Amino acid sequence: MSLFLNVILPIIAVFGAGFILQRIKLIDVKSVSTVSLYIFLPALVFTKLYEASFDSSYTIIVIFACVQLAAMILLSKLARRVFNWSHSVESASILTSAFMNAGNYGVPIILFTMGDEAMPYAVFMMVIQTMFMNSFGVYYASRSSSGIGQAVKKVFKMPATFAAIFAVILQNISWEIPDSIYSTLTMLAGAAIPTMMVLLGMQLASITSIKFNWQVIITTVSIRMVIAPLIALGFIAFVDMDPIIGIVLIVVAAMPSAATTTMYAIQFDTEPDLVSSITLVATIFSVLSLTVLLNVLPY
């Protein structure tokens, strides 16, 4: 109960602040998202990865991310066969099962439960997920109207991608970033997490149309919230890694669907009401599932 009161409840309260603000003031969520995406998030990614010591641990994270993405896509395709879903419903299921909320939700949870030691791994996982979401996510949302080429181009338009690349490059050359510049980046990075948390609440409040197809919702939420963490458990059982990384992978795998997928579904008309419903149900369910999970993990 103390973990719920000290970790989950404060995070939900921040989400709730964004939710209430959006319901009252009807702020342009896209503008807030743009500020976070182009200023705060790149600063967070750059500083955390610049300070990290890259080793085989990061290779393990990439391998896990690829394994989980493939598993989620295959399970959604299997569900389409079993339940005879349309291709658009399959795409909706893939969007909401394969792409978890590793940033707005996952990073704060890991920060508040595991501290700064785990943050580079959480941020790196967030970068990988962002790249996947802006490539495979865009592809599955728009595959009826565009191809993988457009999706891949989108990855290299994301500031966080370049922030990660520059962090790795600068970490491996002799030039040091001046303190005045780095202190500015650190200040901006400090604003990233609370902004992302408030933004998630605003995104959830912006959901205006839902479609409760419970067969699809229960199946997809089960894949995202139950099977994904079990896959993570199986992965760390067979791969030798730092226990901290193992816990990060399990926690991130247990995150609900990324709210960004709703924007993609709306933009490309890929069952937006259904995607919104799955995201909303998964986020509500996560309050219970994450409380249970965090109480049993040995962090």
Image (tube, helix red, strand yellow):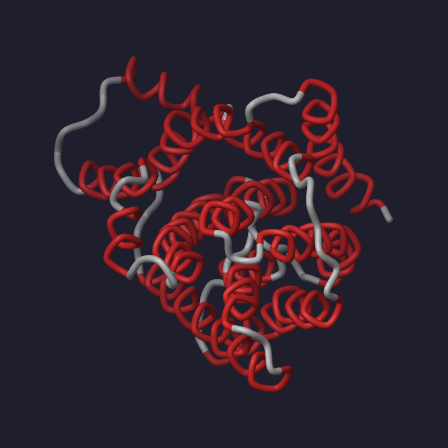
The quarter in which the C terminus is drawn is bottom right
Above or below, 44 relative to 52: above
Asked if residue 102 shows in the view, the reply is: no
Q: Is residue 12 left or right of residue 253?
A: right
At x 47% / y 63%, what residue is drawn? 242
User: Which one is nearer the viewer's eye here, 264 or 109?
Assistant: 264
At x 36% / y 22%, what residue is drawn? 185
User: Which one is nearer the viewer's eye here, 98 or 106?
Assistant: 98
Q: Is residue 205 left or right of residue 292?
A: left
Most extreme residue toward the right is 1
| Residue 211, horizontal then vertical, whole percent | 71, 56
User: Which one is nearer the viewer's eye here, 276 or 156?
Assistant: 276
Most extreme residue toward the top is 180
User: Which one is nearer the viewer's eye here, 104 or 188?
Assistant: 104
Above or below, 175 relative to 122: above
Picture quadrant of residue 158: top left
| Residue 42, horizontal then vertical, whole percent | 36, 33
Tally of marks: 0
At x 24% / y 49%, what residue is drawn? 153
Most extreme residue toward the left is 174
Picture quadrant of residue 138: bottom left
| Residue 65, horizontal then vertical, whole percent | 42, 64
Q: Is residue 40 left or right of residue 75?
A: left
| Residue 240, horizontal then vertical, whole percent | 44, 74
Above or below, 181 relative to 98: above
Q: Is residue 236 left or right of residue 180?
A: right
Asked if residue 22 shows in the view, the reply is: yes
